Image: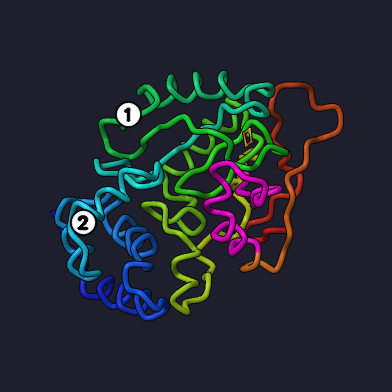
Amino acid sequence: MARLTTDNVQRARELIALYPVPRSALIPILHVAQEQDGWLTPDAIVHVAELLDLTAAEVLGTVSFYDMFFTHPVGRHLVSVCTNIACLLNGGYELLDHAEQKLGVKAGATTEDGEFTLEEVECLALCGAAPCLTVNWRFFGPVTPESFDKLVGYLRDGELADQVPPHGTLCRVRRSVGLPASSSSGAGRVAPRKDEAAAPRAAPPAGADKGGRGEKEAAGAGAVTAATGEGAQVERPPGADTAATVDDSRHQKGGGA
Ligand code: FES
């Protein structure tokens, strides 16, 4: 069970320096620790406590309060499907059911190969692209069962590695220590394979400042948009029915337009 690496200790110290009181850096440092292993190991919690002169119990108290922190291993790709009202009305539960069948696990579980953890979540603040989901906090919507299957294939094959970093890397944390949101933070779109036409695209959260789980990550998702200099919005094709439809007409590899 790993403690923080030397590099991450350095990042933690840079974060601590941003605040008048070291303990104020707790949550950003927890994100750094979670980025390292995908979850917060017991040793990492102890290490974070040492860095901030807190007790492990105090750190665990914060960790257990927030649903974006994990105290158990999660898959390489954390797939979070929204079933809140806008997504519910546009097929969110059908999408979740399909995801469970496709991945062979129930929400809350991890596939045997450790590739995917599936979870059901409240509003991601991407209601305009319902039904939607995030993979490692990168937004995709609207997502159909068909485009979900393609998305899973892309993720398994590593074709979205430049847009969906492992373990839910958060742009916000990196930016807060003076590191720019790099292209690896996500280009805002999922490009199709050469021989395929349809795939869901990553998108910034429309109305991300309106609350819901996406509110927590609004800054991070905004960084994705900022990195491309674009304000991409998810559109629904004319005539789209209540079933989610993927607009793939403007996909561009690494484009984000
Ligand atoms: S209801 Fe699903 S993103 Fe808001």
Say if the magenta span includes residue 212: yes
Residue 102 is a magenta residue: no
Q: Earlier in the sequence, mark 1 or mark 2?
A: 2
Q: Is residue 14 left or right of residue 134?
A: left
Q: In which quarter of the image is ligand 1?
A: top right
Residue 121: x and y in percent read: 49, 33
The kind of secondary structure element at disc 2 is helix
Q: Residue at x 30, y 41 (%)?
A: 74
Q: In this view, does 53 lie to the left or right of 202?
A: left
In this picture, residue 18 sits left or right of residue 12: right
**148 lies above or below 24:** above
Image spot of residue 213 (x, y percent) = 54, 43
Which quadrant of the structure image shows residue 67?
top left
Given the image, on which type of amino acid does mark 2 rest? Answer: Ile
Q: Is the magenta stretch mostly helix, strand or loop?
A: helix
Which circle marks residue 97 in the picture?
none
- Decide: is 243 above or below 228: above
Along the viewing direction, whichever of 108 and 57 lies nearer the viewer: 57
Q: Is mark 1 on a helix, strand or loop?
A: loop
Q: Give the range drawn in magenta.
A: 201-225
Within 10 Å of disc 2 (Cα), the crowding (few <14, some 14-19, many 20+) is: many
* Residue for badge 2: 45
On the image, which quarter does residue 253 sit in?
bottom right
Name which residue lies at 36% across and 35% down.
117
Residue positioned 41% across, 76% down in the render: 19
Residue 56 to residue 148: above or below: below
Location of residue 31 in the rendering, given as x and y in whole percent from the top left corner: 36, 58
Quarter that holds the C terminus: bottom right
The amino acid on which the numbered mark 1 sits, given as a three-letter code, is Ala
Query: Residue 178 location, x and y as percent?
Result: 47, 79
* Disc marking residue 109: 1
Mark 1 residue CB less than 8 A from any atom of ligand 1 = no
